[in-house]
Amino acid sequence: MLMVLRARVLIAFSFFVVGLSLPFSASAVQNNRSLPLSAESVLLLDPEGKVIYAKNAELDHAPASLVKLMTLYLAFEDLEAGLVTLDEPVIISHAAAMTPRYRMGLRAGQQVPFHVLMEGVAIASANDAATALGERLGGTEADFVARMNAKAQELGLASTRFANPHGLPDPHQRSCARDLARLIGRLVTDYPESRTILGGQTFLHNGRLYARHISLFNDPGGVQALKTGFTREAGYNLAVSAWRSGQQFLMIVLGARSRALSFSDAKKLLRYGFVETGLESPAPEPRPRLIPKRAVKTRRVVAAR
């Protein structure tokens, strides 16, 4: 039964692969409509993988913590292959514990379950957890990065180059909206269980509750899987998979000027996509405001004598 389900999922994803392979202008806007967006680069794909809206979708950009989507992809790959288990304790190295912010506060020598590290990466966007995962899956961080780049090539991420498993700034770490849309699309399709972890808002470790407050989860936009990313270099980034009426939409927002603006851009894009695909009715045109005519006072003119 699981094999049949996986086969159906892969067939459905083939539509996305076809759509993503189609050429389009780096600053194309579908249907000649331009949306007021803060982000430098955006891409929205319909359920068949076709471009609904694009702005600088192939522009070279720092991915920030969207790098962690590949870290999670390889974690799920090894889980499925039986090379690691969810409850396996991972010993935290000194290098992982010293990875700069944002962190879970992991300590060298500490043993942390593999699934907790995955939650730390997906929900808390913890850089120390990403380093620990990379070391567990690759032996060393450098070897894991080599594996990330090999998988990027395999997935057809032609404009992507990884330099670390967490997304902290590195001049060699680059991607674009088109590649990142392909990456999150493959992640949630090849490993549907990733929707749960990317849709999570809280997890508990060592008596501490880690939480993220994402307004998009409470908006009726159908967002089920989401990863944020931020560095001063990259600005505010988002990777989103949303479902409406059983249909999946993929969206990337790169380089928004604030966290709030990245969420605002995402809402505008999703609303636009749902209308363009007929899942929602367009908002009614505002009725012109009628200004009452002022009564014109007439003056009696008396002719001079």
Image (cartoon, grey):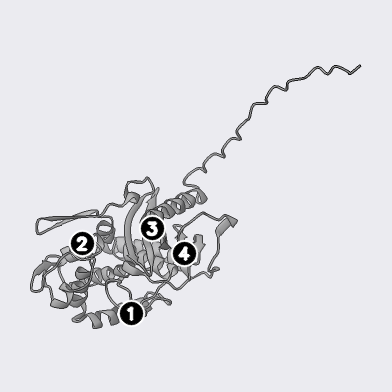
**Which quarter of the rendering shows the N terminus?**
bottom left
* Residue 119 numbered mark, or none: 2
Residue lying furthest right in this view?
A: 305
- Residue type of the residue flagged with mark 2: Glu
Of residues 1 and 283, the one nearer the viewer is: 283
Residue 16 placement: quadrant: bottom left
N-term-proximal mark, 1 vs 2:
2
Left or right relative to 133: residue 24: right
N-term-proximal mark, 3 vs 4:
4
Q: Secondary structure at mark 3?
A: loop
Residue 116 versus residue 141 in the image, above or below: above
Instruction: State the residue position of label 3.
Output: 258
- Residue type of the residue flagged with mark 1: Asn
Mark nearer the viewer, 1 or 4: 4
Of residues 22 and 226, the one nearer the viewer is: 226
Q: Position of residue 26 (x, y in %)?
A: 53, 69
Q: Which residue sits at x=45%, y=73%?
A: 60
Mark nearer the viewer, 3 or 2: 3
N-term-proximal mark, 3 vs 2:
2
- C-alpha separation, residue under disc 3 versus residue under disc 1: 29 Å
Instruction: State the residue position of label 1.
Output: 149
N-term-proximal mark, 2 vs 4:
4
Q: Secondary structure at mark 4?
A: loop
Left or right relative to 107: residue 253: right
- Residue type of the residue flagged with mark 4: Glu
